[in-house]
Image (cartoon, rainbow, N blue to C red):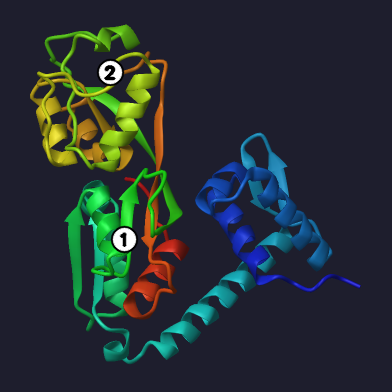
Amino acid sequence: MRPPLDPDLLATFLSVVQHGRISAAARAIHLSQPAVTARIRRLELSVGAPLLLRSVRGVAPTPAGERLAARAREVQRLLEAALDDFGDDEHALGPLSLAVSTTIAAHVLPSVLARFRARHPELPVSLQVANSEEVIAAVRAGRQPLGLVEGTARAVGVRLEKWLDDELVPVMAPDAPFVVRRDADLIPLPLLWREPGSGTRAVIAAALKRAGVRTRPAPLDPVLGTSSAIANAAAAGLGVAFLSKWALAPFLATGRLKPIPGLSFAIRRTFQWALPAGALTGSAARFHQLATQHPPMPS
């Protein structure tokens, strides 16, 4: 007898088909690569046919895989439609209110909010934009039902759940009055920092400490309140910045900033949901589900 078909396996399979690589799908759905591979094997056992062709370029669905992917998309649409049927009463859902850290609010969330608004055009939407510590405090105190933060390791009284991967890229102005070829070149240079309480600042400080560059901002390092302010200051030649890959695209496209190669360290982090101790309800639950199932992609 074939084992019963687990709907979670279908979602994993669709992610693999979408991304074309087991590793990329694993990152997108926050599982390890072996866990994704095991799920695909279980699904192949359930349907009784190979579903993926593997090559050096990644994976592609077999003819059976193509048929199953089409069916899986139908199942996904039916499930989403069923949820929408229960959410037709916009007043029952209530307004959507979120606390969101600044980088996510400016560069990651707009496309997700647009998708949510398209599904729920009558619902009011409001964001409290703050640094990560303030977002966590708002969720912990019950002032906000849901939050999004950058790279926080712990949060007392709040559950943290991984959402998206990010990388902070070292950049400088193409005509900056200094040269950076290795880690040690950063030591005497001005570095651009976010304010205390920022998740971005905490992640950068930890990476620079490990590299032996800084343990904290130097007296003459500029401290600025938003990633946009830091990007523009770096483009003006005020110092070296470490900016989210989500924020960099327009500055790289216009040539106002350039990445710095040759450094020995990478600064990677995750964007995380800050969730209350209890269950999500109403618009917050619906938004969390939508953003998790349809995450945005960096431009």
Q: Is residue 19 above or below residue 145?
A: above
Q: Is residue 233 above or below residue 108?
A: above
For the question of whether residue 109 can be seen, the reply is no
Quickly name the residue at label 2.
214
| Amino acid tagged 1 | Gly
Name which residue lies at 29% across and 88% down. 90
For the question of whether residue 72 can be seen, the reply is yes
Quadrant where the C terminus sits is top left
| Amino acid tagged 2 | Arg
* Residue 49 image offset from top left, x and y in percent: 81, 61
Q: Nearer the viewer, residue 103 or 278?
A: 278
Q: Is residue 216 left or right of residue 68?
A: left
SS at mark 1? strand
> What is the tally of numbered marks visible in this picture?
2
Q: Is residue 78 left or right of residue 128?
A: right
**Dividing the picture into quarters, in which one does residue 42 lie?**
bottom right
Quickly name the residue at label 1.
147
Q: Is residue 56 above or below residue 51?
A: above
Quadrant where the N terminus sits is bottom right
